[in-house]
Image (cartoon, rainbow, N blue to C red):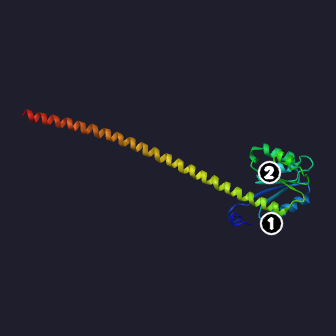
Amino acid sequence: MSADEGAIDRVAPALRILVVDDDKNAADSLCFLLKVWGFDARVAYNGEEALTAAQAYSPDCLLSDIEMPGIDGYRLAESIRQNEALKGVTLVAISASPDEARARAAGFDHHFAKPADTQAIEEMLRRLRVMGTRLHQTEELVRQQGEVVSEARDVMKEVKQEVQEMHQELREVKEDVKEMRQDLKEVKDKQERV
């Protein structure tokens, strides 16, 4: 783990991961391992259960077997990609099927062959967490900059209003000065006649 990842581990919330596999022992074992690594993990034992769980849990990442009865991993990935609320979920296929191209075509972002290299999975998940945290930080900076721009616009409106008021006051002062000059001229004219 890098120093950057260590810093993120101390401040970022745990990555939410949904494990989907019809092999209950494999699913439970992977879920346990994910929790040991510090991730927030839950299990679904088939594609239909995974769709329901994903809606309720809003995972950051879904680790799914491909070959399952009913809704297989491909259909699960396609369904998640079509769901507006779940489009940002990172989908990871963990399958005995070597057809990575088909997995990617269905919507998976990553593909690991069974038996999966747990160290590679952990490394990918930690990178995903770092990227998610950086994205969140960037979004927060953009939000803050938006607030600053909005405040600057408000200040500019106030300054513009004050400048307009000053221009009005200057016009009034000019009118006053013009009237005073006229009055002075009239007084001077009267004195010259006397």
Horizontal and vertical percent for residue 170? 32, 41
Residue at the (74%, 59%) spot, across then down? 127
Classify residue 31 as left or right of residue 14: right
Q: Give the residue type that dot 2 points to.
A: Asp
Residue at the (39%, 43%) spot, across then down? 163
Residue at the (82%, 58%) spot, across then down? 42
Q: Give the residue type that dot 1 points to.
A: Val
Quarter of the image with the N terminus is: bottom right
Extreme residue toward the top, this view: 193
In primary-sequence order, the first of circles 2 and 1 is 1
On screen, residue 124 above or below 181 = below
User: For residue 134, what is the image quadrant?
Assistant: bottom right
User: For residue 135, what is the image quadrant?
Assistant: bottom right
Q: Secondary structure at mark 2?
A: loop
Extreme residue toward the left, this view: 194
Classify residue 62 as left or right of residue 69: left
Horizontal and vertical percent for residue 166? 36, 43
Classify residue 130 as left or right of residue 54: left
Mark pair 2, 1: CA separation: 24 Å
On screen, residue 127 above or below 148 = below
Q: Secondary structure at mark 1?
A: helix
Residue highlighted by disc 1: 36
Residue highlighted by disc 2: 109
Q: Nearer the viewer, mark 2 or mark 1?
A: 2
Horizontal and vertical percent for residue 182? 20, 35
Residue at the (74%, 49%) spot, across then down? 88
Quick check: marks 2 and 1 in contact, CB under 8 Å? no
Quarter of the image with the C terminus is: top left
User: For residue 137, what is the image quadrant?
Assistant: bottom right
Q: Which mark is residue 174?
A: none
Task: Give the crowd class for mark 1: few <14, some 14-19, many >=20 residues within 10 Å.
Answer: few
